[in-house]
Image (tube, grey):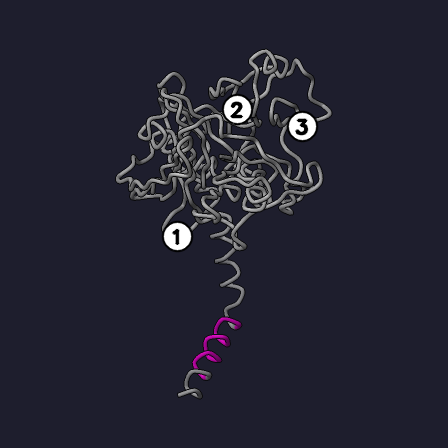
Amino acid sequence: MKNYIFASIKTILQRLFRYRYYVLLSIFIWGVSIPFFVFYGPFHNIKSIVTGTLWTSSRFKNIPLIFLSHKQINAILPDAHNGKSIQKIDSYSYNKNKKLSIKLYSIKTKTFNGKALEISDPFSIKTAYTSYLGTKGEPLSKIAFNNKAIAAINAGGFLDYYSTGSGGIPNSFLISDGNIVYKDKSLNMNDEVDVVGFNEDGVLIVGVHRLNDLMKYRIKEAVCFGPPLVVNGKPVILKGDGGWGIAPRTAIGQKKTGEVILAVIDGRTLGCLGATLKELQDVLLELGAYTAANLDGGSSSTMYFNGRIINKPATPLGERNIASAFIVVP
């Protein structure tokens, strides 16, 4: 039997070698034609999904630029296809003490899965960050453990030079306990930045604001990211899928009654590719968000709860080093 198998493999290899030029030519033709089919073909949905997914990733951002100009990419992204809605949510409850309660939800749809936490006390939400701020990042579980957090999600974006996963340099700024703990040297206090954070009244603030104005708003905890998904109880994305393709997602929201929603969508696996921004928006609306914003996604999307990671991060090692997190501290 073994001799037969080896003989068969040998025959196949010999034929491949004999026709190697045809094999290589076929591979070359397919390798060239598929990208042209995706980026120049008549199927706009495929073009928008692939372009959005690559454009919003850290490692493959430059691939669309091989085929498209910045102007063409900007024209494609805002007009992507509609996503799927939530099919089922399983609810659980967790009570740490009388002041703070946490509800854990399982998000299950036909196309993606995820987790969500509903935090009763908005004042328990804090901005946390790597112990090596400006140098290298740390896994979310480490940041949560160091800060004695019950729950946590990854938060703002960060610079990851050469895609090494170092994750120690936050995008633009970080505000923790009312103090600017990090600010990019090139950032002026009058510059407009994408903001996701909480003021001293425990109200979630999202959108583009000047850094100076954040001090006037009495912002206490904040990171730089976006875009907003829900404002004043209304969805922001009214057409298309948001233009960022399909990927793992992280988001934060707040109900009109004050409870905070932390959500993570898994992705980049065969059975769960991820969600569009529109789908993420729909999740937050169904969970009751009055205000909500997108946070850093992709390989960074991670949720920590009760001592462990409860989602499935899209990295072989389980967790990516990140710069910042929103944590829940009793």
> From the viewer's perspective, is the residue at label 1 or at label 3 nearer?
3
Quadrant hosting residue 175? top right
Q: Which residue is mark 3?
A: 181
Q: Position of residue 90 (x, y in %)?
A: 29, 42
Q: Secondary structure at mark 1?
A: loop
The quadrant the N terminus occupies is: bottom left
Amino acid on which the number 2 mark rests in the picture: Gly
Figure quadrant of residue 109: top left
- Find residue 270 and name its label: 1
Q: Nearer the viewer, mark 1 or mark 2?
A: 2
Q: How many marks?
A: 3
Q: Nearer the viewer, residue 194 or 39?
A: 194
Q: Position of residue 296 (x, y in %)?
A: 52, 35
Q: CA distance from mark 1 to mark 2?
A: 34 Å
x%, y% of residue 304? 48, 44
Q: Residue furthest front?
A: 98
Q: Position of residue 152 (x, y in %)?
A: 50, 39
Going by the numbered disc 3, the residue's amino acid type is Val
CA–CA distance in space, label 1 to label 3: 40 Å
Whole-number angstrom distance, CA of label 3 to CA of label 2 = 14 Å
**Residue that appears at 51% across and 52% down:** 318
Label 2 sits on a secondary structure element that is: strand
In reply to whether residue 10 is colored magenta, the answer given is yes
Circles 1 and 2, Cβ within 8 Å, touching? The answer is no
Residue drawn at the location 51% of the way across and 58% of the way down: 25
Task: Specify whether residue 205 is painted magenta.
Answer: no
Q: Please provide the residue range marked out in magenta.
A: 7-17
* Label of residue 197 in the image: 2
> Within 10 Å of the Cα at label 3, are there few (<14), some (14-19), or many (20+) other Cα atoms?
few
Q: Is residue 144 left or right of residue 239?
A: right
Q: Secondary structure at mark 3?
A: strand
